[in-house]
């Protein structure tokens, strides 16, 4: 049985956290890494104000707003931080994917 949670109004299948990559499966729910690793420590020190946010994103591709490659695209809270300090925690249910893909950058908080 899968574990589901509602994230920003979208039902998502939760997974073991894994680091976000440019070639990860999209759309996905992401959050800043917040564990005892160096990346988690970096986030607690540098991005502490972002630790409470979870975003659903469609890709990490360079966006029209000029976001550099390798950084989070524009989204409500996590836009502009390096993807190396972000982890995937879930994926939207299949019926929600088409709706998310049709929007510019998925839902936000």
Image: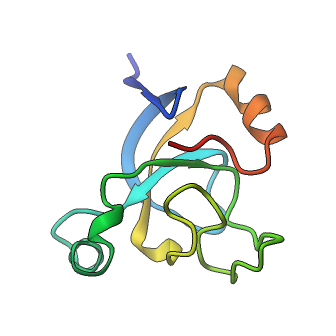
Q: Identify the residue shown where x is 42% and y is 34%.
A: 14
Q: In this figure, which colouring scheme has been used for the structure?
A: rainbow
Residue 38: x and y, percent? 24, 80
Give the vertical position of 85 relative to 99 (above or below). below
Left or right: where 10 falls relative to 102: left
Q: Residue at x 68, y 44 (%)?
A: 106
Residue 83, placed above or below residue 92: below
Vertical side of 31 occupied by 65: above or below? below
Q: Residue at x 70, y 78 (%)?
A: 67
Residue for point 43% across, 65% down: 86
The single residue placed furthest to the top in the displayed view is 1
Task: State which quarter of the image contains the N terminus.
Answer: top left
Front-most of residues 45 and 30: 45
Residue 53 percent coordinates (x, y): 39, 52
92 vs 73, nearest the viewer: 73
* Residue 71 at x, y percent in the picture: 59, 76
Quarter location, residue 51:
bottom left
Number of numbered tags placed on the structure image? 0
Residue 21 point in image, percent of width and height = 57, 67
């Amino acid at each position: 049985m899968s574990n589901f949670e509602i994230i920003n109004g979208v039902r998502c299948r939760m997974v073991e956290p894994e680091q976000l990559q440019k070639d990860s499966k999209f759309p996905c729910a992401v959050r800043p890494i917040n564990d005892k690793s160096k990346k988690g420590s970096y986030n607690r020190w540098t991005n502490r104000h972002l630790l409470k946010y979870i975003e659903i994103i469609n890709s990490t591709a360079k966006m029209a707003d000029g976001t550099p490659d390798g950084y989070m695209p524009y989204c409500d809270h996590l836009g502009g931080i390096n993807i190396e300090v972000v982890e995937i925690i879930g994926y939207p249910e299949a019926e929600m994917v088409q709706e998310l893909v049709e929007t510019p950058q998925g839902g936000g908080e």
